[in-house]
Amino acid sequence: MPILGTFLKDGDCLTGVIRTSTTQARLTFTPDSDGILIASIDGQPVGHAEPRPSGDGITCFVVYLRPEVLPEAPFAALVAKACVFVLTTCR
């Protein structure tokens, strides 16, 4: 699975750079009151990430981005790996 970006915690948010066939931009995931992460580029919402329960203690989210941002796949995965979160495509 190709890596689309890596994200670091910045307070309550996750920030990083996303690179797809159509987009290269700073992407921020900001939590809402329901535990959903709102994905935005330059302050404009472009999707969201829903937490995925994991029995092994790994933090994981299913990420849905607008097709113009992520044309390669219907969704992506955001997974905690050590001190960073890695965004990869899912098919």
Image (tube, rainbow, N blue to C red):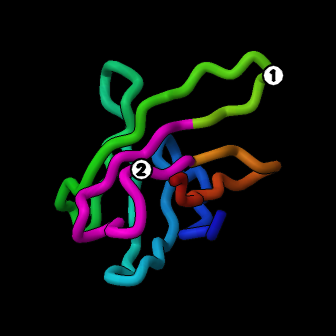
Q: Which residue is mark 1?
A: 56
Left or right relative to 72: residue 68: left
**For the magenta stretch, what is the residue range?**
61-77
* 73 or 6: nearer the viewer: 73
Vertical side of 40 occupied by 69: above or below: below
Image height of 49 relative to 20, above or below: above
- Distance of label 1 from label 2 (alpha carbons): 22 Å
Residue 2's x, y, as percent?
Answer: 63, 69
Residue farthest along the front direction in this orientation:
91
User: Label 1 crowding class (10 Å Cα cut-off): few <14, some 14-19, many 20+?
Assistant: few
Q: Which quarter of the picture shows residue 38?
A: top left
Q: Amino acid at mark 1?
A: Asp
Q: Residue at x 40, y 68 (%)?
A: 72
Residue 80, by quadrant, is top right
* Circle 2 residues within 10 Å: few <14, some 14–19, many ≥20: some
Give the secondary structure at mark 2. Answer: strand
Residue found 55% across the figure and 26% down from its top: 52
Three-letter amino acid code of the residue under disc 2: Phe
Left or right: where 85 falls relative to 52: right
Please tell me how many numbered marks the rendered image carries.
Answer: 2
Q: Is residue 13 magenta?
A: no
Quadrant of the image occupied by residue 27: bottom left
Answer with left or right where residue 61 lies relative to residue 72.
Answer: right
Callout in the foreground (1, 2): 2
- Horizontal side, residue 57 vs residue 14: left or right: right
Residue sitting at 65 percent across and 45 percent down? 79
What residue is pinned by disc 2?
A: 75
Under tag 1, what secondary structure? loop
Q: Position of residue 33 (x, y in %)?
A: 31, 22
Indicate whether residue 65 is drawn in magenta.
yes
- Which residue is at a point 41% across and 24% down the rendered structure image? 35
**Among the two numbered marks 1 and 2 on one chain, the one whose residue lies closer to the N terminus:** 1
